Structures are given as structure tokens and as C-alpha cells.
Amino acid sequence: MTSIGLISDVHAAAAPLDEALTIFRREAVDQIYCLGDIAGYNDELESTISLLQASDCKSIVGNHDLSYIEKTNALNGNSSETDASLSYLQQLPSVIDTVIEGKSIYMVHAEPPEACHGGIKLRDKTGEIIAERVEIWSEKLAHFDHDILLVGHTHQVYTERLGETLVINPGSTVFNHCCMILHLPEMKIDTYSLCGKPIE
């Protein structure tokens, strides 16, 4: 059995991320994955990245990370100065495609194959799952050859079977106050609220 800590859209806010990582340590997870958007909205990027690195978290790149890279490179021009945050974000892959406990898992920030925009939006403004959206995405993923698809970007928390694939979005640590632990091979999910706030 393998347990995997899942976070996404931490958006340079260190406190909720730190709480999620504390939960993962307490629950003795085997691996941790962040589904992108480490940067954006808040101003604690350096400490956020330090927390991710200290926890040996594997991350993929999100749209806010790409924006940070683009803006920082434009500001630096041909400068040889080293920006640790820039260096970290630049080396992140756009996807992770792996097999754990016999389950094929694909991770992308918004939607496959490599999109950082768009995203799999399944909930309405009140938080209810929209049946039509489930049907649309089930059709889109009909030939998606993975057991599990892990996504972020939309700031929507859900675990839904779309076609033959279990699609999981752990939401945003800072905006949804949420993290998850995925247990394999049984594909069971535990969801945790953060910062004493309800999951949104």
C-alpha cells in the first residue's frame, strides 16, 4: 500500500501549505505531489518553495508559475543574477506520468495532455456537481488510457469517475482550504480541511 499527499494551487501562501504538509507527516504519506500554481496572488513564494523542497514534494508547473517565469525573465533581461524561485519553477515538468501500486497516474495542471489553462470544471457556483459537465468530460476522456487523472487549476474540490478514469482535484490549499491523501491500490481518498476553515 502507498499513500500520496495531494495539494494544488498553493499560490505563494505558506501557512496553509505548511499545515497540509504537517498533516502529511502525521499520516506518514509515502509521496507528495503538487499539481501546479505554486506562484501567484500572495508574496511568500520563496518560503513556499522552501517548504515544498524540504518535504521532497514533486511538482508540476501551472499557469501562474509560467507567468512568473516569463515576467522574471523579462525583468532580468540578460542578467546573470540567480533567482532561486525562478530556477525552481523553470525545472518543473508540465506533466507527470507514472505507475504506482499498479495504477497508471497522469498529472497535469488544468487538463490533458499538457494544458495549464481551461481545466475540468464540474461544479456550479453553489458547489453542486453539474451532470452535463460530467457527461461532457466522460466523453472527452473516453479514450484516456490511465486509471487516475490528477488536476488542479479550477479551485474546485472533487473526486469523480469520468469514463474509466478516476479524476481527482484536491482544490487550492489557500482558496479551498483543502488537501487530500490518495491511498493505492484501493484508490481511496481522504480529504482534510485547512486553517480551521470549511472546504469551499
Image (cartoon, rainbow, N blue to C red):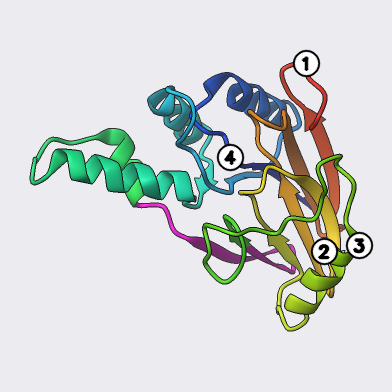
Q: CA distance from mark 2 to mark 1?
A: 31 Å
Q: Compared to 23, does 124 lie above or below?
A: below
Q: CA distance from mark 4 to mark 3?
A: 25 Å
Mark 3: which secondary structure?
helix
Q: Could you tell which of marks 1 and 3 lies nearer the N-terminus? A: 3
Residue, x 48% and y 25% (percent of image)? 42
The verdict on residue 100 being magenta is yes
Q: Could you tell which of marks 2 and 1 lies nearer the N-terminus? A: 2
Which residue is the site of mark 4?
9
Which image quadrant is residue 20 in? top right
Q: Position of residue 118 (x, y in %)?
A: 60, 59
Which residue is the site of mark 2?
133
Q: Position of residue 160 (x, y in %)?
A: 85, 58
Which residue is at the front of the view, 84 or 198?
A: 198
Residue type at mark 2: give it: Arg
Q: CA distance from mark 1 to mark 3?
A: 31 Å
Question: Is there CB contact under 8 Å for labels 1 and 3?
Answer: no
Residue type at mark 4: give it: Asp
Image mark for residue 196: 1
Image mark for residue 131: 3
Magenta highlight range:
91-106
Question: Is there CB contact under 8 Å for labels 3 and 2?
Answer: yes
Mark 1: which secondary structure?
loop
Q: Of the residues tagged 4 and 3, which is closer to the observer?
A: 3
Residue 72 in the figure: left or right of residue 200:
left
Q: Position of residue 49 (x, y in %)?
A: 43, 32
Residue type at mark 1: give it: Gly
Q: Position of residue 25 (x, y in %)?
A: 67, 28
Residue type at mark 3: give it: Ala
Q: Could you tell which of marks 4 and 3 lies nearer the N-terminus? A: 4
Q: CA distance from mark 1 to mark 4?
A: 18 Å
Residue 34 in the figure: left or right of residue 179:
left
